[in-house]
Structure formats: C-alpha cells, structure tokens
C-alpha cells in the first residue's frame, strides 16, 4: 500500500497524532518496565527452598540473657525433643524466610585481592543439617568435634557450600579442598558440597544469588543459636509450635519468643511473599489500566478521524476501493503510529529502568520485554482500530458523498 496518502492525511491532524504517539510511547515504557518487575517477582515466588518445608517448624527467639547460654539451649532442646510429634530438633541461627543471621562477605585468597560473594551462612547444633534436610551430595558432613562455641563467627574449620555457589566461585573446578577467607586470619576449607538451599532473605539479592549459602557447625550457645528448628509431620505443625512455645517459656520465662517470625516454613514463606503478591496485583492492575486507556484513546481518535474523512472515504469507494481496502487503510495507519510510539517508548523504557535501578535497586530490564511490549501494543492498536475501521468500510459511496 502507498503510504503517501496516509502521511498526507495524518499531517492534517498533527496535534492529535502527536498526542496519540506520546500516549503509546508512555504506555509502552511503563508497561515494559511493569511487566519486567511482575515477571521478576513471579520468578521469586517460584524459588524452592531445597528443604522439606511441610515438615519443618521454626521458633525464633531474641536469645537468653543467662550467663550459660549453652546450658539453657541444651535444656530447651531436650524439652523440644520430648514434645509429642517432634521427630528431631536443633538450635540454629535461621531458616529460609527467617531473619538474616549470618550475611557475610568473603574472599577467595588470604591477601583479600579476590573477592568471593556476599552470602548467607547457616549454622546450628549437632544434627541440624539432618533436621533441616540439607543433602550433602559430595564430600562429607561435620565431625562431632567440629561443633563448638564461638563469638561472631568460627575462627576456622570446615565449611559446606551450596552447589550453585560453588559453581559460581570455581567454575569448572572441584570445590572440595578450596578455601575462603573472612579476613586474613579466618579461613574455612570446603569439606562438602550440598544441594542448593535458599538463603534466609532471598529478596536481599538477585535471583541468580538466591542460593548463595554455606553451612557451619556450632555448639548450643554459640552466636545466634537461640532459635530452634523442629521436624514433625505436616498435620502436627501447629500443635508442635504451640507446645514448643510453652516448653521454652517454662524453662526460661525471660526468653522472648518472636512469634511473628516463628511458624512452619510454609507459613513463613506465605508471610514473606505477601508483599510480592500485592505488588504483582498492583503492577498487573497498572498494566491493564494503561492498556485499556490507550486502547480507548486509539478507538476514540480513530472514530473521530473516520467522521472527519467521510468525503475522502466516499471518493475512494467511488473510485473502486473495496471495503477491505478501507479497512486496511486504517489498520496500516494505526500500525505506523504505533510503531512510532513504540520507537520513542523504547528509549523511555530504558531511561525509566536506569532511573529505577539507580534509586530503587530494581533489576535490569531484560531486553526480551521490549519486543513483548511492542507486540502487545501492535495487537492492541489493531484491535482498537477495528471497530471504527469496519464502520468506515461499511459506508456506501453514495451515503458518504451526501454526508460530505
């Protein structure tokens, strides 16, 4: 189709054309970024902990003030293991979707020239890996003698590392026997590689870093071991949690239980993901609203143009133009305007994403969402213009000429 008549007609409606193109550009920029954010949050909802969530109950406390913390925690563990339905229990620093209790950056060399990652360390009392269900797939687990008291972090010893983190740190190499350093004096040697386990606060880092986890041994009373994880059958989780609260309060009434961050792992996840689900709904609403407003704008403006071009349509019909030619005319016109708006919107979308990355730490917009947004707006434009275009195509030549 010759586009010169299209361009000529559009130049007679410059103001409305500019407004429509800007509307499409703005919609494209916002929808592309909103879609990227929605899919990023959806991907976070699909992350798996790597543990048997339905059988785990977590009790979070602020730690005892007793002088001998180890004795208090050991007494609590004995009481928790006697609760009906409890299969095993251990003291831990945290669990997936629990509070962050061991986020530390480390190096791959003693001179601190090769930075590794900022990752999350799990640690707990003897047997905590079995209670959680952590699977050591290569190497070995901790010896009983490795579980000892420490301050902020163990001074040295063995560490078990998540498989995904090991692959990132030493691609194409065996992680067993490798070392990491927390300063020049604190060195851990990798003794085992575990199946991926989600970090406590996966939203703290990107999806690619969600499984940056390591495991250390700790005696009851060591740093951050005042919380407890219990293994039980799924139907008994709430009863076990209630009995655990009672047992802990009976042994140490001064120990404050953080009930909002205690519960089954599935309940903790549901609470943790609540804001994500709300944000997905809000962004989805923004996308639908913008697309609806843009579609109505295209429909209304095209209907106005059809009314203004009644004489032009009649002349074209009288000269032999078919209904399909009239329909194609308006569809092509809309495609050109949508394409111009999308081209401007691409620059705006990238600019908005750069601004959001700088001020709100949102992830980079994957380039794939630009063509997705473009196709969506092209389809929206064709759908919105279809009604007015069909009305124009149905106008008989004689009626159009009389109306003129």
Image: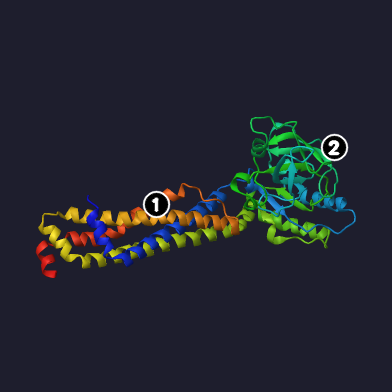
Left or right placement of residue 365 versus residue 1 in this view: right
184 up-or-down from 352: above or below: above
The x, y position of residue 201, in whole percent, is 66, 52
Residue pictured at 52% horizontal, 55% vertical: 353
Q: Nearer the viewer, residue 117 or 132?
A: 117
Give yes or no for contact between labels 1 and 2 (Cβ–Cβ under 8 Å): no
Q: Residue at x 36, y 61 (%)?
A: 21
Residue at horizontal 27 percent and vertical 56 percent from the top: 333
- Label 1: which secondary element: helix
Which residue is under mark 1? Answer: 374
Q: Which residue position holds label 2?
A: 145
Q: Is residue 157 left or right of residue 229?
A: right
C-alpha gap between disc 1 and disc 2: 61 Å
Give the left or right position of residue 156, taking residue 319 as reference. right
Indicate left or right for 243 with 72 as reference. left
Within 10 Å of disc 2 (Cα), the crowding (few <14, some 14-19, many 20+) is few
């Amino acid at each position: 189709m010759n586009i010169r008549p299209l361009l000529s007609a559009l130049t007679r409606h410059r103001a409305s054309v500019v407004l429509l193109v800007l509307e499409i550009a703005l919609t494209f920029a916002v929808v592309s970024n909103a879609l990227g954010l929605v899919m990023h949050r959806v991907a976070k909802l699909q992350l798996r902990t790597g543990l048997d969530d339905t059988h785990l109950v977590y009790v979070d406390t602020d730690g005892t003030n007793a002088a001998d913390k180890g004795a208090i925690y050991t007494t609590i563990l004995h009481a928790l293991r006697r609760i009906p339905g409890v299969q095993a229990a251990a003291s831990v620093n945290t669990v997936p979707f629990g509070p962050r209790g061991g986020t530390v950056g480390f190096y791959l060399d003693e001179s601190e020239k090769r930075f590794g990652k900022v990752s999350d360390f799990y640690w707990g009392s003897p047997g905590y890996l079995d209670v959680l269900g952590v699977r050591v797939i290569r190497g070995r687990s901790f010896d009983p003698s490795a579980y000892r008291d420490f301050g902020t972090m163990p001074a040295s010893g063995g560490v078990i590392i998540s498989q995904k983190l090991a692959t990132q740190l030493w691609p194409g190499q065996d992680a067993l026997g490798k070392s990491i350093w927390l300063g020049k004096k604190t060195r851990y040697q990798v003794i085992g590689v575990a199946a991926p386990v989600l970090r406590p606060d996966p939203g703290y880092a990107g999806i690619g870093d969600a499984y940056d986890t390591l495991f250390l041994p700790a005696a009851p009373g060591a740093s951050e071991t005042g919380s407890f994880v219990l293994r039980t059958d799924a139907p008994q989780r709430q009863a076990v949690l209630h009995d655990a609260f009672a047992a802990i309060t009976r042994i140490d009434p001064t120990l404050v239980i953080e009930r909002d961050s205690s519960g089954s792992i599935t309940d903790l996840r549901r609470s943790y993901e609540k804001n994500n689900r709300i944000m997905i709904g809000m962004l989805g609403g923004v996308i639908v609203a913008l697309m609806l407003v843009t579609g109505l704008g295209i429909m209304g403006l095209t209907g106005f143009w059809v009314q203004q071009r009644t004489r032009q349509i009649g002349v074209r019909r009288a000269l032999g133009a078919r209904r399909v030619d009239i329909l194609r005319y308006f569809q092509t016109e809309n495609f050109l305007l949508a394409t111009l708006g999308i081209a401007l919107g691409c620059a705006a979308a990238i600019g908005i994403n750069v601004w959001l990355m700088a001020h709100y730490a949102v992830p980079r917009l994957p380039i794939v969402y630009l063509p997705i947004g473009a196709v969506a707006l092209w389809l929206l434009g064709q759908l919105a213009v279809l009604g007015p275009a069909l009305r124009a195509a149905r106008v008989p030549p004689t009626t159009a000429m009389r109306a003129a």
